[in-house]
């Protein structure tokens, strides 16, 4: 698969991936990126900072996330993101949708290959 | 002149305390700052988040063998063009401005219209004047309130949690300047309420305003004056309980009994005015019955965002 196609598929998954990371525990921007890197390895590169922060702010506006600031180690406050109940519900719905997609692929394309 | 520069006050200068002593990172932050909308406080929130990320990234790159100067440059390169982030922040603020313009403007203009209708003898004859007044109130009030909300207001700086015998305790309280503002509000709004009360009995300059208008203004002024006490309200949140201490006493809720923290609807916040956002704290009493208590929390309180996030996240479906 061409890298661009791969990126497009992963980008469609980003909301779900970020919410999934935050469902484990609250985290800050860099921490979220690192958690994704641990899970996705090289593929985490698709979550560029230029994509991650607007995405976090968008999810916050949709009230799927909440943010708050805490005193940070570097002398300035650190902004943390926390998933809301609505965020968890959305995550479950999205996970179910992706499961259905996977099931379809497994019964068709993956089976043939 | 770019529109966003009209929203930058009291000064355009980059906050010097955000300098990192890394030439590449400092240059990046300064470029980013030039493209951001809002007061110094509003811009700071974005700058601090980006600064934190860049410094974390730099530390990681240093650990993986990059030199001091390479690490800073690489961290900023990875973060993407500053203008891209600035544009996203500007769009976010403009969108908020438009939403709040209509919300604040429509509610205020509607309230004023009701008051005008009460005091206008012949509604049909004054229809065009009332319509003009409605539009003026909506534009004027909507613009100023939305401008303040979108480009000026910032959450109070977070304060560290306090260590006690019961463990870490989050304290939520107003800063000194909020208390001075609350005293001013109490005097001004209390004065309006008293004038309207006197007017109801035919005394003072509000005597000619009519009883309905005096009653409405008395209720609004009284609510605002009493609501000023929020500046002396303190919330303390430990692992086991939430305590609300105000001028009127103290209340404690077990953390296990708290079910939800729900924002009260906008219309209710305008009818029952308070200095801050009203939430319904939903909790279960000793008999297993669900109870609701109104708590008022405002962004000028230290750590209020963390309190809201913690209590909302505790929601038990």
Image (tube, rainbow, N blue to C red):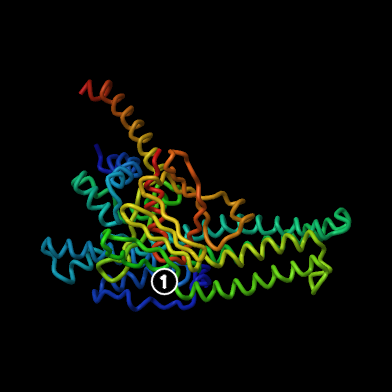
Callout 1: residue from which chain? B
Locate residue B147, reporting x and y percent: 56, 65
Is B128 placed left or right of A93 in the picture? Answer: right
Locate residue B32, reporting x and y percent: 37, 68
**Quarter holding residue B304:** bottom left
Q: Residue furthest front?
A: B287
In the picture, which quadrant includes the C terminus of chain B?
Answer: top left
The residue tagged 1 is: B34
Is A60 placed left or right of A49 in the picture? Answer: right
Rendered position, B24 above or below A92: below
Mark count: 1
- B108 and B94: which is toward the camera: B108
Locate residue B289, reporting x and y percent: 47, 39
- Give the residue at x 28% y 21%: A108
Locate residue A103, reporting x and y percent: 29, 25
Mark 1 Cα shell of 10 Å, populated few (<14), some (14-19), many (≥20): some
**Quarter holding residue B218:** bottom right
| Label 1 residue SS | helix
Q: Residue furthest left?
A: B65
- Give the residue at x 33% y 77%: B17
Is A69 placed left or right of A34 in the picture? Answer: right
- B312 and B102: which is toward the camera: B312
């Amino acid at each position: 698969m061409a890298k661009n196609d791969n990126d497009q598929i992963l980008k469609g998954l980003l909301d779900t991936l970020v919410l999934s990371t935050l469902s484990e525990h609250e985290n800050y921007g860099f921490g979220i990126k690192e958690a994704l890197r641990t899970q996705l390895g090289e593929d985490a590169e698709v979550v560029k900072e230029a994509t991650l922060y607007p995405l976090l702010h968008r999810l916050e506006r949709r009230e799927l996330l909440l943010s708050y600031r805490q005193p940070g180690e570097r002398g300035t406050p650190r902004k943390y993101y926390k998933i809301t109940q609505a965020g968890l519900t959305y995550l479950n719905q999205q996970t179910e949708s992706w499961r259905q997609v996977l099931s379809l692929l497994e019964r068709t394309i993956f089976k043939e290959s | 002149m770019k529109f966003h520069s009209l929203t930058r006050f009291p000064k355009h200068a980059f906050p010097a305390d955000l300098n990192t002593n890394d030439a590449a990172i400092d240059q990046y932050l300064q470029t980013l700052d030039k493209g951001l909308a809002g007061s110094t406080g509003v811009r700071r929130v974005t700058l601090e988040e980006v600064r934190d990320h860049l410094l974390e990234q730099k530390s990681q790159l240093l650990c993986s063998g990059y030199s001091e100067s390479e690490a800073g440059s690489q961290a900023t390169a990875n973060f993407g063009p500053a203008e891209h982030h600035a544009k996203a922040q500007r769009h976010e603020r403009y969108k908020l401005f438009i939403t709040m313009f209509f919300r604040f403007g429509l509610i205020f203009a509607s309230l004023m219209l009701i008051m005008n209708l009460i005091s206008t003898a012949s509604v049909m004859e004054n229809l065009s004047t009332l319509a003009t007044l409605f539009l003026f109130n909506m534009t004027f009030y909507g613009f100023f309130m939305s401008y303040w909300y979108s480009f000026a207001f910032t959450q109070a700086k977070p304060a560290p949690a306090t260590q006690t015998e019961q463990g870490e305790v989050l304290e939520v309280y107003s800063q000194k300047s909020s208390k001075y503002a609350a005293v001013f509000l109490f005097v001004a709004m209390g004065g309006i309420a008293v004038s309207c009360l006197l007017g109801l009995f035919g005394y003072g300059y509000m005597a000619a305003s009519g009883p309905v208008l005096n009653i409405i203004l008395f209720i609004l002024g009284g609510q605002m004056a009493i609501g000023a006490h929020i500046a002396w309200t303190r919330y303390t949140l430990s692992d086991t309980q939430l305590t609300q201490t105000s001028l009127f006493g103290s209340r404690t809720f077990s953390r296990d009994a708290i079910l939800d923290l729900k924002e009260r609807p906008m219309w209710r916040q305008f009818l029952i005015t308070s200095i801050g956002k009203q939430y319904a704290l939903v909790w279960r009493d000793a008999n297993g019955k669900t109870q609701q208590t109104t708590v008022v929390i405002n962004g000028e309180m230290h750590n209020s965002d963390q309190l809201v996030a913690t209590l909302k996240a505790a929601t038990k479906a």
